[in-house]
Image: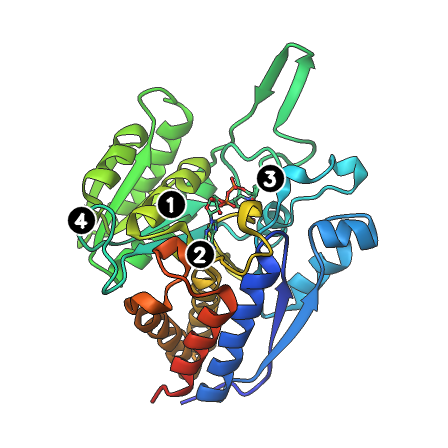
Amino acid sequence: MTTNTSRLRLLVLEGDGIGPEIMAATLRVLQAAERAFGLKLAFEPAQVGLAALRAQGTTLPDQVVEMAKAADGVVLGPVTTHEYPPRAQGGRNPSGELRKTLDLYANIRPARSRAGFPPRCGKPIDLVIVRENTEGFYADRNMHLGLGEFMPTPDLALSVRKITREGSTRIAEAAFRLAMQRRKKVTAVHKSNVLRVTDGLFLECVRAVAARYPDITYEERIVDAMAALLVRDASAFDVVVTTNMYGDILSDEASEISGSLGLAASLNAGSAHAVAQAQHGSAPDIAGKNIANPAALIGSAAMLLAWLGDRRKDNELTRAAAAIEAALDTAIAQPEWRTPDLGGSLGTDAFGEKVAAILSTSP
Ligand code: NAD
């Protein structure tokens, strides 16, 4: 039963590279879900990235940040950050700045193999990497003022890594809450054998949260071993909690093991806001060719609907999210419906149409 009838305002930011193509496919699917489940969605498009730089002199106009704060949710395409000019010339990382400004501390990154498509580690996998998203080694978000990277001399570059008790505790709590709804296992990934102080603090906080969840099996792995264990048998993991950069790297690895980076959905969530965003980048090597897999962004949009459904106690949003996931499974199960990254030949737009068509027949 739908308990909230107000229109949901979703800010839509295409981004760069394959962004416009995969966003068009994602919107087609969201519109099909809107019709099938009687949702009331209002899509508010705005420009970020290189198009915004050309038109407005910055890759992230202030007005877009204000729109993101006012929206119920944001769907963000990938951004070609490494081509952006320095900040003084308009280069701002939309992804990093939105995470910091909206305090999206939890980056939830599932990696799930799909029926009919063999995972690369041989066994079906279903894990979620819960990545801290607002501190760590990320120079654009770990300082109050200035950047966490600097050059005291032309031959010396330094990078500061920030780990806080608050940041570590709240990401651990997000991981354990999630594990309670899943297979009740949490793996904390760290490098405290070398980074004794920072990763030591992170582990201390995760252990304190673990002590409050006696029903959850808790284990710890060092990040380099974890990279190998994922390849060996990723089916051994359920919820993996870790700091920002380890989570970024391991989640690309896990999603590729599950089938393809093109399947890698993710949600950036805080206590008041959420941004749907695929794990992958803007893939300039395949941009404009209609061959990118839009499943990651479609799946991310489904995660946003699920997050909104949970917050608003709106069953139709929750059902729509589950139906989008199921429609992705159905489409990917057919070899002739797969995009080239999965060995098929279907285009980005045709894949979006297939998923939308499956949704329109949802019970
Ligand atoms: P990438 O993730 O864009 O691409 C890595 C490889 O995966 C490429 O071969 C690409 O073709 C392929 N790939 C990625 N998404 C795909 C999809 N949906 N379907 C099929 N194949 C897909 O990483 P990169 O090439 O290292 O980075 C490109 C740009 O993206 C850089 O400017 C980087 O800074 C940026 N980036 C942005 C984000 C983000 O917006 N969240 C994340 C990572 C990288």
Identify the disc placed on residue 141. 3
Residue ID for mark 4: 122
Distance (Cα) linking label 3 and label 1: 20 Å
Secondary structure under tag 4 reads: loop
Residue at the disc numbered 1: 251
Q: Which residue is mark 2?
A: 266
* Quadrant where the C terminus is found in the figure: bottom left
* 151 left or right of 63 in image: left
Mark before the other along the chain sequence, 2 or 4? 4
Q: Residue at x 55, y 25 (%)?
A: 160
Work out whether 325 lies above or below 186: below
Tell me which residue sits at (65%, 44%) in the image: 93
Q: Nearer the viewer, mark 2 or mark 3?
A: 2
Confirm if mark 2 falls within 8 A of ligand 1.
no
2 and 1 marks in contact (CB < 8 Å): yes
Front disc: 3 or 1:
1
Pinpoint residue 38: horizontal percent, then vertical percent.
49, 89
Q: Which amino acid, mark 1?
A: Ser
